[in-house]
Image: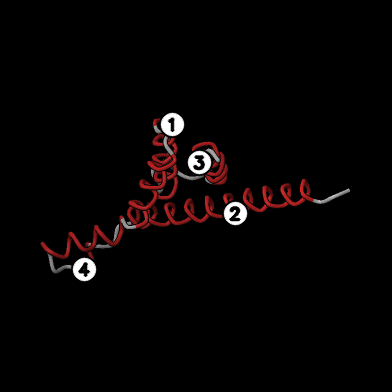
Amino acid sequence: MNYKKVLTRYIQGRLSELSNVDAYEPNKLALTNMLFFLGKVTSNELIVAKLKIMVDADIKRKKYLSRYDGNESLYDDEYSKAVSTIGKKCLSYLRNEKKEVQDENKASQEDLEKPE
């Protein structure tokens, strides 16, 4: 399964839903950045690694900032939250697509094995 094609189609669908939103809205910006990344990458492993980094972005940012400043009100960042959310949704979408492909392959294999 080509993760690049699957995610590109998913992200383009999500971006079309946000067509009336400002280009700098956090979710739209995170999706646009991910789409740009997908245009440059070819490896499924690299895509999964990027998504895993995205999932932890908000937590790691808060942990980093907490070392230097005790003001927790500065820790909330809508873009970091959007990146984390988009990463989680993309990973779950990939898992669901992969499961569907495996189920289809299993069903077609069972059809081949049935005697007529």
Instruction: Tell which circle, 3 or 4, labels the residue nearer the N-terminal end.
Output: 3
Amino acid type of the residue that numbered disc 1 sits on in the rendered structure: Gly
The residue wearing badge 4 is 72
Q: CA distance from mark 2 to mark 1?
A: 24 Å
Picture residue at 52% right of the left edge, 50% below the top:
94
Q: CA distance from mark 2 to mark 3?
A: 13 Å
On the picture, is 8 further left or further right than 39?
right
Q: Are marks 1 and 4 in contact (CB under 8 Å)?
A: no
Amino acid type of the residue that numbered disc 2 sits on in the rendered structure: Lys
Q: Are marks 2 and 1 in contact (CB under 8 Å)?
A: no
- Circle 4 — which element? helix
The residue wearing badge 1 is 39
Task: Name the foreground residue: 15 vs 54.
Answer: 54
User: Crowding at label 2, few (<14), some or many (≥20) Cα neighbours within 10 Å?
Assistant: few
Q: CA distance from mark 3 to mark 1?
A: 12 Å
Picture residue at 41% right of the left edge, 47% below the top:
48
User: Crowding at label 4, few (<14), some or many (≥20) Cα neighbours within 10 Å?
Assistant: few
- Circle 2 — which element? helix
On the picture, is 116 further left or further right than 80?
right
Q: CA distance from mark 1 to mark 4?
A: 36 Å
Instruction: Tell which circle, 1 or 4, labels the residue nearer the N-terminal end.
Output: 1
- The x, y position of residue 34, in whole percent, is 41, 41
Residue 59, placed above or below residue 98: below
Residue 71, placed above or below residue 114: below
Q: CA distance from mark 4 to mark 2?
A: 40 Å
